Image (tube, grey):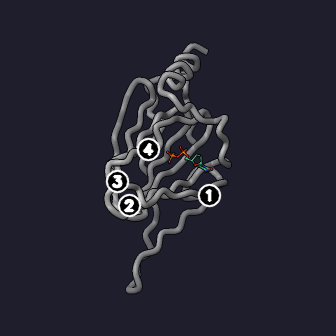
């Protein structure tokens, strides 16, 4: 398990994860087991789909939640921001995930037609864990980097 380092504001608290692809003549299969293929126990799964052209999703950060985003169909871009650095990923493979740790602002946009964003989450839905405005996110990051 990677140590979450919110005090080091330069830490990129995210990374690309490759999942297995089991191929045979019937097609491909990708298994994901909590605590094995992803480092947390999966407590929640949700998916974003039927996204109208030009729509943006997310636009928030989490104080403690870990998530993995996977483009199980189509493609989309994920812009990540730790308060000091930003990085944009195009997800377009069902066996590639993007692990995002706590304290990371994320925007998801540029959804292709038919795109489906599968999200694996380390905890149940909890509105209290959200930082819903960029101002609150910056204040939270500043507070953590001082402590
Ligand atoms: P929101 O977090 O804004 O979605 P996104 O990250 O895709 O922009 O959530 C949209 C709505 O769905 C909001 O009313 C909260 C609700 N919701 C749940 O009830 N459970 C969940 O697991 C999630 C992620 C959202």
Instruction: Label 4: state its secondary structure.
Output: strand
Q: Earlier in the sequence, mark 3 or mark 1?
A: 1
- Residue 15's tag is 4
Q: Which residue is mark 2?
A: 115
- Looking at the image, residue 14 lies above or below residue 39: above
Q: Are marks 4 and 1 in contact (CB under 8 Å)?
A: no
Q: Are marks 2 and 1 in contact (CB under 8 Å)?
A: no
Q: Which residue is mark 3?
A: 111
Within 10 Å of the Cα at label 2, are there few (<14), some (14-19), or many (20+) other Cα atoms?
A: some
Q: Nearer the viewer, mark 4 or mark 3?
A: 3
Instruction: Label 2: state its secondary structure.
Output: loop
Quarter residue 33 falls in = bottom right
Asked if residue 18 shows in the view, the reply is no
Q: CA distance from mark 2 to mark 1?
A: 24 Å
Picture residue at 57% right of the left edge, 43% below the top: 66
Viewer-closest of 127 and 30: 127
For label 1, being within 8 Å of ligand 1 is answered no
Within 10 Å of the Cα at label 1, are there few (<14), some (14-19), or many (20+) other Cα atoms?
A: some
Q: CA distance from mark 4 to mark 1?
A: 17 Å
- Looking at the image, residue 78 lies above or below residue 144: below
Q: Is residue 33 left or right of residue 109?
A: right
Q: Nearer the viewer, mark 3 or mark 1?
A: 3
Q: Which residue is mark 1?
A: 34
């Amino acid at each position: 398990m990677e140590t979450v380092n919110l005090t080091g504001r330069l830490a990129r608290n995210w990374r690309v994860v490759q999942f297995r692809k089991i191929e045979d003549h019937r097609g491909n299969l990708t298994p994901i087991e909590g605590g094995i293929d992803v480092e947390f126990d999966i407590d929640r799964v949700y998916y974003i789909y039927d996204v109208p052209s030009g729509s943006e999703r997310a636009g928030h950060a989490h104080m403690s939640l870990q998530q993995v985003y996977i483009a199980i169909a189509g493609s989309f871009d994920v812009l990540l921001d730790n308060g000091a650095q930003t990085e944009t990923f195009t997800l377009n493979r069902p066996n590639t995930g993007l692990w995002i740790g706590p304290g990371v602002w994320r925007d998801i946009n540029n959804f292709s037609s038919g795109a489906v964003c599968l999200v694996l989450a380390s905890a149940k839905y909890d509105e209290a864990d959200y930082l819903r405005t960029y101002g609150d996110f910056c204040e939270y990051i500043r507070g953590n980097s001082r402590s």
